[in-house]
Image: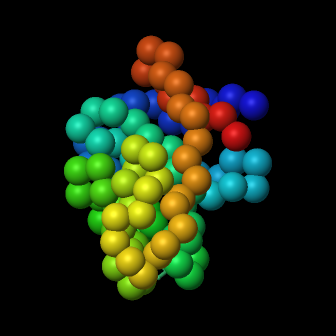
Amino acid sequence: MKFKVAGKSEIPVGKVKVFELEGERIALCNVRGAFYAIEDICTHDGGALDQGELIGDIIECPRHGAQFRVTDGGVIKMPAVVPLRTFPLFIEGDDIYVEV
Ligand code: FES
């Protein structure tokens, strides 16, 4: 199902906004004007990724420093080894929709 979660103007470049949808914690990331939706829970030990730093398309967990690519959830740096889940995202005008 597709849900409207934010307006593009609410999330500046390089910022992350977290929200809950259907019981999932999802982080919406603005990478140089392109938006991506990832699960907000680090696969290493549950760190809240929105509290970490988004550098380009890489997000760093604030707990032990694991890094993930927000474009596809891939692991860039240990200690995490399992990729993040990502969610389909659609833009219509200024509105961002995420499908869960
Ligand atoms: S909980 Fe994220 S690196 Fe450990």
Farthest-out residue, top: 93
Instruction: Report the colour scheme.
Output: rainbow
The answer to whether residue 97 is above or below residue 78 is: above
Which quadrant of the figure contains the N terminus? Answer: top right
Farthest-out residue, front: 81
Q: Position of residue 96 (x, y in %)?
A: 51, 29
Q: Who's the residue at 43% across and 21% down the image?
A: 94
Q: Position of residue 97 (x, y in %)?
A: 57, 29
Q: Position of residue 78 (x, y in %)?
A: 38, 77
* Residue 64 or residue 78, whichever sits in front: 78
The answer to whether residue 64 is above or below residue 25 is: below
Side of 52 relative to 81 (left or right): left
The answer to whether residue 92 is above or below residue 51 is: above
Q: Who's the residue at 50% across and 44% down the image?
A: 37
Query: Which quarter of the picture shows residue 69?
Result: bottom left
Query: Which quarter of the picture shows residue 31?
Result: top left
Is residue 47 something that shows in the picture? no
Is residue 8 something that shows in the picture? yes
Q: Please state the total of marks drawn on the protein image.
A: 0
Which quadrant of the figure contains the C terminus? Answer: top right
* Residue 87 or residue 94, whichever sits in front: 87
Q: Position of residue 9 (x, y in %)?
A: 35, 32
Q: Who's the residue at 34% across and 42% down the image?
A: 30
Side of 64 relative to 83 (left or right): left
